[in-house]
Image (cartoon, rainbow, N blue to C red):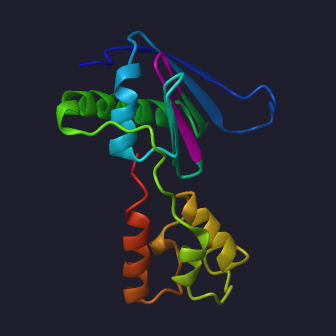
Amino acid sequence: MILKSFRKEIFRPECNPDFTSLHLYAHLDQDIGAVIPYLNTELGGFQCTREPPSVTFKNRGRLITVHARKVAINSLRDEEEADKIMNWLQNQINDVWSRRNKIAPSYETAQRPQIIEILKRLPRTNCRKCGLPTCMVFAARAAEGIKGADDCPELSSSSRETLAAYLGGFQFDV
């Protein structure tokens, strides 16, 4: 087990105190820098750097950045969501570390879904039934992991499966 404990710091961003979302810094009691390239391989980092080691995941409109001694997560609803994500992440870190001899470490950034490829799989009717003004906006949100195939009511069953399969190669669930 590489990550045993951490201390949470939950706050509202100083740049805009009117934000309703919260941010989290988890100050790690252990240095987990060695697991970062393995996490990047397993979870498909949005961005990964070698020095200083860090990996960022983009999920459902939020960024999760893992550093050697700190984790930063933005756009949290409440402390319960912060706990849920940190527990998940701690489990992922420890699981990946325990399997590291079977994983090829990488600092390469994972491929991201392409908006145009998502748009090709949508009906392009701009019906607004999904709550967004256009299919292009829907495609952008899907590329960020905020929307998924089930969120487009105009998709046929086969188109929904095709879009879900395309997006499935890029996202992870928290």
Q: Nearer the viewer, residue 102 or 173?
A: 102
Report the side of 88 relative to 83 (left or right): left
**Percent position of residue 159, x then y:** 43, 86
The answer, for residue 84, to whether it is visible in the render is yes
**Percent position of residue 42, x then y:** 32, 43
* Residue 93 position by quadrant: top left
Q: Say which residue appears at 51% left-offset and 82% top-offset.
A: 121
Q: Nearer the viewer, residue 12 or 49?
A: 49
Picture layout, residue 32 above or below residue 12: above
Q: Is residue 118 magenta?
A: no
**Percent position of residue 36, x then y:** 40, 29
Q: Is residue 63 magenta?
A: yes
Report the side of 119 relative to 128 (left or right): left
Q: What is the number of callouts on the image?
A: 0
Q: Say which residue appears at 43% left-offset and 58% top-offset.
A: 170
The answer, for residue 88, to whether it is visible in the render is no
Q: Quadrant of the C terminus?
A: top left
Q: Say which residue appears at 63% left-offset and 87% top-offset.
A: 124
Task: Decide whether the magenta segment is chiefly helix, strand or loop.
Answer: strand
Picture layout, residue 151 above or below residue 143: below
Q: Which residues are magenta?
A: 62-71
**Percent position of residue 75, x then y:** 62, 40
Most extreme residue toward the top, as rendered?
29
Q: Quadrant of the N terminus?
A: top left
Picture layout, residue 98 above or below residue 7: below
